[in-house]
Image (cartoon, coloured by chain):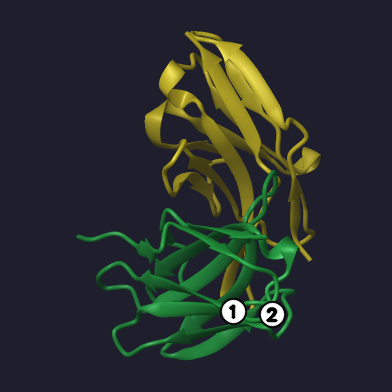
Amino acid sequence: AQSVSQHNHHVILSEAASLELGCNYSYGGTVNLFWYVQYPGQHLQLLLKYFSGDPLVKGIKGFEAEFIKSKFSFNLRKPSVQWSDTAEYFCAVPFSGGYQKVTFGTGTKLQVIP
Amino acid sequence: ETGVTQSPTHLIKTRGQQVTLRCSSQSGHNTVSWYQQALGQGPQFIFQYYREEENGRGNFPPRFSGLQFPNYSSELNVNALELDDSALYLCASSWDGGYGYTFGSGTRLTVV
């Protein structure tokens, strides 16, 4: 079964610092991957997704992620964070077997200090 | 275009009681999925409803059940509540079970 792991549970950065959040997946077949964000008090939103093609995926709000098959990784990056990026970030992998579900990682809480 | 709305937003129940959570799917979406997000964890898939039938289920006991109505809205029912059921319950709607999920803001259930 697919799974994703996020090793950083809580990250604190100053504004303008660069961000990289780790995500590793375990699945031997075709890999599709997502990053979701949950801002305080708001619903989960899709940041970006990888299904195939260019391994460097660009998402909303200046985020990007790189799919590295050899490392089983799909790390999320942003060159310069803002206070408004304070949120919880989830790496996720979809499963399709007669129905669709998404398996989420445990999440990384990002706190950006002004 | 309306999003996914869930009610109530917060709920406190006593162990052993039963609870019903409600979800109105986004306009045009015919599939509803329910997730449980415990504190400090990522959302866990409970089940999915498509065309009023359950068509997929995660690792949750039968006391977690659901319904989907002809207008594609949905209910999640939990019987014999346990303390560990305390969590944020998320509803997500999509079209034909696709991954274009729209999530609601969730119902925070506290079992005491």
Q: Which residue is mark 1?
A: B18
- At label 2, counting other C-alpha atoms closer than 10 Å, the crowd grade (few under 14, some 14-19, many 20 or more) is few
Decide: is B110 above or below A70. below
As drawn, the label of residue A104 is none
| Residue A94 in picture, x, y percent from top left | 61, 61
Element type where label 1 sits in the image: loop
Q: Which residue is mark 2?
A: B80
Decide: is A46 above or below B12. above
A89 on left or right of A8: left
Amino acid at circle 2:
Ala
Q: Chain of mark 2?
A: B
Q: Earlier in the sequence, mark 2 or mark 1?
A: 1
Decide: is A80 above or below A61. above
Element type where label 2 sits in the image: loop
Q: Residue at x 69, y 48 (%)?
A: B41
| Residue B17 in picture, x, y percent from top left | 63, 77
